[in-house]
Image (cartoon, rainbow, N blue to C red):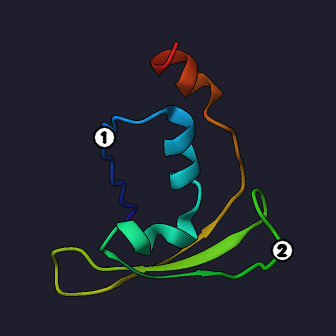
Amino acid sequence: MKDYRFITRWRVNAPTQIVWDVLNDAMRYPEWWPCYKRCQHLTPGVTGVGSVSEYVVRGPLPYDVHYRVEVTHYVWCVRWMAEHDG
């Protein structure tokens, strides 16, 4: 299977902590990100490293993309904050 990488850059005019909190709550993505059709947490009670979730998204192309995410490493955005809010 071929590897794919999608790189995007977002510019958001909001405090870093608020942006971090919103992006860190993937189960709520469908509330504000229309391409997310379904988000399901597969490891109840587990957050951060070890948590597993499944997602279904649909962009402009006429098919759904199903994928699973397992958190293997978790670093709060301290470095990013120092570079952008400092």
> Are the residues tagged 2 and 1 within 8 Å (C-beta)?
no
Q: Residue 39 appears at what percent x and percent y? A: 52, 80
Mark 2 and mark 1: Cα distance apart in space: 31 Å
- Quadrant location, the N terminus: bottom left
Name the residue beneath numbered marker 2.
Answer: 45
Disc 1 crowd, CA 10 A, few/some/many (<14, 14-19, 20+): few
Compared to 23, does 32 lie above or below? below
Could you say whether the residue bearing mark 1 is in a helix, strand or loop? Answer: loop
Disc nearer the start of the sequence (2/1): 1
Which residue is painted at 55% across and 24% down in the image?
Answer: 81
Which of 62 and 10 lies nearest the eye of the viewer? Answer: 10
Q: Residues within 10 Å of mark 2 (few under 14, many from 20)?
A: few
- What residue lies at 58% left-to-right and 49% top-to-bottom? 21
Q: Nearer the viewer, mark 2 or mark 1?
A: 2
Numbered tag placed on residue 19 in the rendering: none
Q: Is residue 59 left or right of residue 23?
A: left
Residue 9 circle label:
1
Q: In this view, which residue lies farthest toward the top? A: 86
Three-letter residue code for mark 2: Gly
In this rendering, does residue 7 appear at all?
yes
The residue at the point 46 percent across, 20 percent down is: 84
Between 12 and 74, which is closer to the camera in this rendering? 12
Three-letter code for the amino acid on which mark 1 is drawn: Arg
In-image side of 15 versus 25 (left or right)? left
Residue in front for this viewpoint, 30 or 75? 30
Q: Is residue 1 visible?
A: no
The image position of residue 36, as x and y in percent, is: 38, 76
User: Quadrant of residue 5 in the image?
Assistant: bottom left
In the image, taking residue 29 as reference, residue 79 lies left or right, namely right
Counting from the top left corner in percent of width and height, residue 44 is at 79, 79
